[in-house]
Image (cartoon, rainbow, N blue to C red):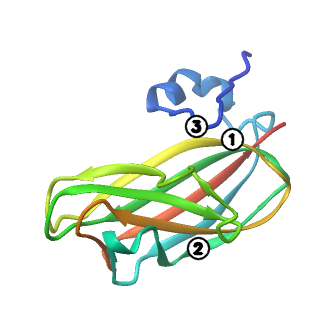
């Protein structure tokens, strides 16, 4: 069985998973040689919140948790939902790790573009975070709109699931 290797920041597409599925799944469960454990860091329904472009990166209320890891490479699966009600534009998303000691990804994070108004949009990223030291890390979801506002409410769900990869 060939070893699968992804690097930090690699975009993992469905085709990557599909073509390598036999190498990470043995037909009865997750291959113990590839994965140690999964951790749902946070997830659930949002409270109503308006995030203004002028405010910069803003914590999303209630979308935080604690990541406990034995260290090493982590498969991060982040799913976000939100909407815009005035102008279309970019929405930036990132995770604050360890109370802002670092950010994933660096800077303003990933972005997606919303070109429909008053329609909830869902986006998911799956990336490798390589070489995180063992420990317990507070994690907080942050968003920012490039223009005007981005909004979340009880129709929006945010999730972060982390899977530790074997060393």
Decide if residue 31 is on the left or right side of residue 160.
Answer: right
Quadrant, the C terminus: top right
Q: Quadrant of residue 147?
A: bottom left
Q: Where is mark 3, residue-wise?
A: 9
Question: Residue 29: which disc?
Answer: 1
Q: Residue at (68%, 38%) from the top-left corner?
A: 28
Element on which disc 3 rests:
loop
Place of residue 8 in the rendered image (x, y in percent of width and height, measured from the top left):
64, 36
Residue 79's quadrant in the figure? bottom left
Of mark 3 and mark 1, the one earlier in the sequence is 3
Is residue 56 left or right of 132 when viewed as pictured? left
Q: Within 10 angstroms of label 3, few (less than 14), some, or many (20 or more) residues? A: few
- Percent from the top left, x then y, of residue 32? 79, 38
Q: Is residue 51 above or below residue 22?
A: below
Q: Residue at x 52, y 53 (%)?
A: 107
Q: Secondary structure at mark 2?
A: strand
Q: Nearer the viewer, mark 1 or mark 2?
A: 2
Q: Nearer the viewer, residue 148 or 95?
A: 148
Marker disc for residue 128 = none
Q: How many marks?
A: 3
> Which badge, 3 or 2, comes first in the chain's sequence?
3
- Residue at 51% x, 58% y: name it: 94
Q: Which residue is mark 2?
A: 64
Q: Nearer the viewer, mark 3 or mark 2?
A: 3
Residue at far top of view: 2
Few, some or many residues within 10 Å of mark 2 (<14, 14–19, 20+) = many
**Quadrant of residue 14 in the image?**
top left
Callout 1: helix, strand or loop?
loop
Front of the two marks 3 and 1: 3
């Amino acid at each position: 069985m060939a070893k699968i290797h992804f690097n930090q920041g690699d975009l993992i597409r469905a085709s990557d998973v599909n073509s390598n599925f036999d190498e990470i799944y043995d037909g009865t469960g997750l291959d113990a040689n590839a994965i140690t454990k999964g951790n749902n860091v946070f997830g659930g329904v949002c409270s109503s919140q308006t995030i203004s472009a002028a405010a910069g990166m803003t914590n999303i209320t209630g979308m935080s948790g604690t990541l406990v890891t034995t260290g090493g490479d982590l498969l991060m699966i982040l799913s976000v939902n939100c909407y815009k009600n005035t102008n279309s534009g970019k929405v930036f998303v990132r995770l604050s790790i360890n109370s802002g000691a670092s950010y994933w990804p660096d800077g303003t994070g990933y972005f997606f573009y919303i070109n429909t108004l008053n329609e909830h949009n869902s986006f998911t990223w799956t990336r490798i975070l390589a070489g995180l030291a063992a420990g317990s890390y507070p994690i907080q979801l942050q968003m920012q709109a490039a223009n005007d506002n981005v909004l979340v409410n009880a129709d929006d769900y945010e999730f972060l699931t982390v899977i530790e990869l074997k060393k």
